[in-house]
Image: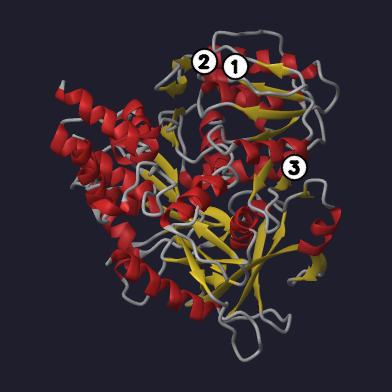
Amino acid sequence: MENTKSIAQNFFEVAKLFENNIAVDDPIDGSISYKAFARLVLYFANNFMGFGKNPKILIHLPQGTLAYAAMMGSIVSGATYAPVNVSSPKARIRMIFGQFCPDLVVSSSNFDTHIPTLVPDVTASSTDFMISETSASSYVIFTSGSTGMPKGVEISRASHSLHVENWIKEHGIMSNDRVSQHPSLSFDLSVSDIYGALTTGATLVPFGRKLDKMFPARSIKSSKISVWNSTPSVINFMESAGELAPSSMPSLRVASFVGEPLTPRQVRVLRKAAPNVEIHNGYGPTEATVAVTHTLITNEEINSSNYTSLPLGDAMVGNRVCLVDLDGQISETEGEIVIAGKQLAVGYWNDLEQTKKSFRTFDIGEGPERTYFTGDWARWIDKRLFFVERMDQQVKVNGHRVELEAVSKAVSDATGFAVIAIQLDQKIYAFVEGRSLTKNEVQELLEETGKILDQYAQPSGIFCIDRFPQNENNKIDLSALKIEALKQIEIASR
Amino acid sequence: MKQKAKIALAEALECEVDEISDRSGLGIHPKWDSLAHMRLLLILEREYNVSITDESIERFMTLDGLQKAFVESER
C-alpha cells in the first residue's frame, strides 16, 4: 500500500492522458475538457499558495465545476479544505466558519467576512505546474454534533487517496464512464464520486440543481449516467415519484450505496428500471473516510427472504473491521462495529478530548492499535456482516447523519422548554414538555429552528406533552414517546 | 384561484385545506417536507401543465408563491 499514488499525481497524469475527455459536464456552467479543467485547478492552486504553507480553505460554492476545481486545487497546493453546503442555514455555515477559522474563503456569492475571499470564474486558468508535497490533512467535513455544534472530521491525504483508490477498483470506474455527483459537497459521500471520476478520466456530472435532487431518475436518464453513487432512501423517493418505469435508465451500469441499510426490496425496484445494473453496497462512518467495506450484491441475496437489509461487505484494502460485544470482547455473532486501519480520521478538528474518547487503543487481533468505535451495532450471519441499529441518539435521515440531541436543543432554544426529539419512519418529531402550542406557534417554531437546522433535520411534527413518560429506572421512556407520537400523528391526520 | 392553490397543496401534503395557513411553506408546515414538495410538483405537472424546473421548484416552496402563480395563470 506504500505505493498509493497521491490524488494530485493521479489527477495530472489522467488530465494529460485524456486531455480531450470531458472532465465535468455541468448543466449550469457547460462542459469542460480535462485540459481546461487542469488549468482551472492550477489557477486555484496558485491562488491558495499565496496564503502560506498549509492554508485552510473554506469552499462555499455550489456543486459544480468551480467547486471541484477548488477542491482539487487545494489538494494540489498543499492546503486543507472544508466544503460547506451553500443551501445550509446561514447560522450553520457561520458555526462551521467559526470552528474551521479559514485563511481564505472561496465563494461565488456574497460571503460576509473580513477574511480574504476569492470569487472565482470558470474561465480562469493557469499553466504553472507544481504539486506541493505536504503532510497537511486533505479535508475537514463537518457533521451533526450532539451539542448542536457541527463536528469537524479531519481526513489525511493518505486516507483520502486510499479510499479513492479502493472505490475506483471495487466499482471498476473507467475513462468512458459518466459518473453522477449527487450527494451535496458537505456530505462525505461526495468524496467518492468526485475523486473517483477525476482521477480516472471519467466525466463527472453534477446533480446540483434542485431538479436533480428532487427527480434524480430524470437526471440519470437525460445525462446518460453510467455510475450513480447515492444513499438507498433516494430509491424510495424515485419510486414515490413514479419515475422508475421499466428499463427507464438503460445507461446505468453501476449503482453504489452507502450511508443507510439497503433493502432487497429497494434493489428489486431499481433493477426494474435498470435491468443490468450492478448493485454495490458499502459501509463506513465519516471518521473512517466515507466507506471501509464493500460488496457486490448477488441475485441470491436480493431474492433471499431471510434478509431485512443487505450485507455490508468485507473490509477494503488497508482496513479491518470487527464486532465487539458489551463486555469488550471480540464477538463472532454480534456487537459494535470497530474499525482499524489506514482510513481512520486524524481526529475531530480542534477537539483533542473528543478525539481521544472516540479513537481508542484496542486490540482487534493484531495487537493494541488505534481504532474507532462506530456506535453501530451489527451481526455476522453466514460470515456476512449486517447492520442492526445505532447504539446512541444518532439517526440517519435520507442518509444524512442527524444527532437527535441537536434537534432537541434547537427546539428547546426556540421555546425555552425541555424538548426531546425522536425518529419514526425516517422522520423526526419533537416533544415539548409542559407547554401547549397552537398550530401557528408550531409554524413559528419551525421557522426559528429552520435557521439552525438543515432541512433534512427539521422536525416533521412538534407535539406537546405534560410530562415526559419515564420507565422503571426513572429514565425517559423513548418507546412510550414513540407510541405517543403515533397517537398524535393519527389525531393530526383526522 | 387562491382556493385552488390550497386544494392542490392539501392533496400533496395529504392534509385538510384548513390545516394550511397563509404562512405555510416547505419546512415550515410540519407536513410540507421534501417528499410532499415532490408530490406537489408532480400534481402541478400532471394537472396544471407546469414544467418542473429549478425556478418552479423554488417558486412553489410557499403558499404565497403557489397562489400568485395560480392567479397569474388565469390572466
Asked whether the beta carbons under mark 1 and mark 3 sit within 8 Å of each other, the answer is no
**Alpha-carbon span between mark 1 and mark 2:** 9 Å
Q: Give amino acid for label 3.
A: Ser
Residue A179 pos. (x, y %): 43, 34
In the rendered image, the vertical position of residue B58 relative to residue B14, given as above or below? above
Is B69 left or right of A172, judged from the image as shown?
A: left
Q: Which quarter of the rendering shows the C terminus of chain A?
A: bottom left
Residue A156: which disc? Answer: 3
**Mark 1 crowdedness (10 Å alpha carbons): few <14, some 14-19, many ≥20:** many
> Is residue A476 among what the camera can see?
yes
Q: Of residues A388 and A109, which is closer to you in this image?
A: A109
Quadrant of residue B73 in the image?
top left
**Alpha-carbon span between mark 3 and mark 2:** 28 Å
Label whose residue precedes the other's in the sequence (3 or 2):
2
Q: Secondary structure at mark 1?
A: helix
Q: Secondary structure at mark 2?
A: loop
Reading the image, the residue beneath label 2 is A19
Asked whether the beta carbons under mark 3 and mark 2 sit within 8 Å of each other, the answer is no
Question: Residue under mark 2: which chain is it in?
Answer: A
Q: Tell me which residue sits at (82%, 51%) in the image.
A: A351
Is A183 left or right of A289, judged from the image as shown?
A: left
Q: Give amino acid for label 2.
A: Glu
Q: Tell me which residue sits at (67%, 45%) in the image.
A: A142
Q: Of residues B22 and B34, which is closer to you in this image?
A: B22
Residue A258 pos. (x, y %): 50, 54
In the rendered image, the vertical position of residue B34 relative to residue A394, given as above or below? above
Label whose residue precedes the other's in the sequence (1 or 3):
1
> Is residue A3 among what the camera can see?
no
Residue A38: which disc? Answer: 1
